[in-house]
Amino acid sequence: MNTDSGRKTHGLAALFAGMALCGLLVLTSPPSWAALARKNETSVTAACNPRPDPADIVLPMPCGLSMIFRLVAVPARGLLWDMPMRPGIDDSANHDRAFYDRRYAATLSGAFTLEDLPPAWRKLAPAGHNHFYGIARYEVSRLQWAAVMDNMCPPADTVDSAAALPATDMTWYDAVEFTRRYTAWLLQNAPAALPRFAGDAKNVGFLRLPTETEWEYAARGAHAASSQQLSQEDFFPLPPAASKADYAVYRPEGQTRAESLAAIGSRKPNPIGLHDTAGNAAEMVLDTFRFSLGGRLHGSAGGFVRKGGSFLSGEAEILPGRREETPFFLTDGPAHARDLGFRPVISGINTPGGNRPQDLRAAWNKAGEEMAPLPQSGHIARNPLEELDRLLAAAPDANVRKNLLELRNTIKENNIIQERQKQVEAQSLLRTSAYMVEIIRNHNIRRKSLQLKIADIEKEQATARGADLEKLRQIMNTARKGVDTFDANIEQALTFYRSKVEEGAQLSPQAFADARDMVSKDFRGKDDFAQNMARHLALFQRHVDFLRKNRPLSRLAMKSEIVERRFQ
């Protein structure tokens, strides 16, 4: 038996044996003994899913236990598209270690499409998304660890409360072995519980450790957070009056806390319902650690990455972007730590059978094929790739054909890079335009408020005398200058906004629609800000559509639409 897993197994055996003894004492002792025993007990349910929720994905486990997952949606447009992301943190607590934590360029997607998911999962999928993976809602508990690694089952419906603590002190290799054994158990005992690729009878979803990007995206709030929040926030947005201590078990600055783990789910969940992604037990991921330099990861792959901080960490160490390296081995063998655990993800291969190969080929054939035509030759404008296809068809020998194919693939790859960049630029254009509408409206609201104050001052001036009148005149002059400043700000913002309308009209209708589809996901909330921004986005499209139809709104009309009414 593995030394580390054996140490943990024997500990749980003692806990279960202790609970059996407590059961005998309850039968033969006064009520005070029973009350004492109950103080150290918890339910088996609390050690697997202490906070049940309708959005839970429940996977069975050995011993009649369960593990709870959440579906993570990735806003990628297609199989060969992905979501740009910048993991890490720019404002590290220690600037001398910025090369550990600095944000870097990454991308993310999910192995499963909507049709690959079990029917019950599809009902939980966020609307408007079609790429997914699953992630455990809690850190793996000691009870779950013992059930998978040693088939050690609880003797009753209640167990010692320590069974609900995160499983820790295992090696990275042990955590990987857990995912292997658990997947194998599911395939043998509950195969329908895992996703199956549409039309593929061979391949199936499986459990593994998350990549760093998968872990961080989920920890920051995933599809429940806007792209701006994902790229700018160092922690997911907290409700008013809330603090990180409501969501994380850690040691706040200046406070003394007992150095101990807490039961899984003891703090509030993040925006997609995950518990303990900050603090409690730090968590292993699949990736090796690389320094973050110049917006990318360094080439030297070291130990593995641990994320989220632990109960021993300070506030700066529990942020989702914090990156820490842990060695796979120390001088005494595989590394492990009393504050280090893990949570698995559910993923699959990128190249399953069924319809996927055909869909991938179709996506590849389409990618990079749409481009501006060459200058007109005679009366016909041609796409360079179409010209190369004609040359390929007429190639006199294999060498010429090979060279033409290499040239075609080079152009196609370059086109794909340009497509990705244009997509990002189009989304940025739409976000900027919606924000400019908000800025113009805000300036106008403040201008109106100042005008009301001026009206009140004019009334007071009618009866004021002497020093009071002079003071009111000074206030009036300042207020009128303020109105002039707001007028100038509105006009400048309007000029900038109109330039964005012109840029929007130059986008193809499909590019505009794709960008709006992605940006709209940032403004799908029910709060006033999200609702306002969604309306601003619709107003921007209205103004772009007018310009495309050669019916551009005048400056005055556009300003009136922005400041005088909400667009419906």
Image (cartoon, rainbow, N blue to C red):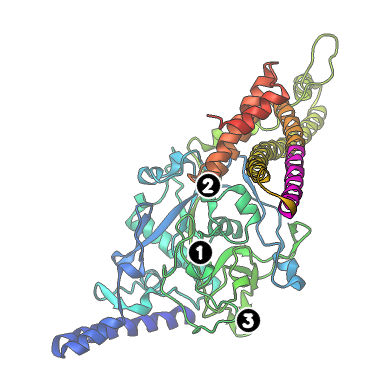
Q: In the image, 263: left or right of 330? A: left
Q: Which mark is residue 241?
A: 1
**Segment tinted magenta in the rendering:** 467-489
Residue 77 visible here: no
Residue marked by disc 3: 330
Query: Which is more toward the observer, 187 or 385?
Result: 385
Dot 1 crowding, Cα within 10 Å, few <14, some 14–19, many 20+: few
x 52%, y 40%: residue? 531
Residue 433 visible here: yes
The amino acid on which the numbered mark 2 sits, given as a three-letter code, is Ala
Predominant SS of the magenta segment: helix
Vertical position of residue 499 compared to residue 302: above or below: above
Q: Secondary structure at mark 3?
A: strand
Query: Which is more toward the observer, 314 or 174?
Result: 314
Q: CA separation, marks 3 and 2?
A: 34 Å
Query: Which is more toward the observer, 216 or 196?
Result: 216
The amino acid on which the numbered mark 3 sits, given as a three-letter code, is Leu
x 58%, y 67%: residue? 307
Displayed quadrant of residue 538: top right
Which mark is in front, 1 or 3? 1
| Residue 309 in the image, given as x and y percentages of width and height | 57, 72
Displayed quadrant of residue 518: top right
Residue marked by disc 2: 111
Q: CA separation, marks 1 and 2?
A: 38 Å
| Residue 368 in the image, given as x and y percentages of width and height | 70, 32
Which mark is in front, 1 or 2? 1
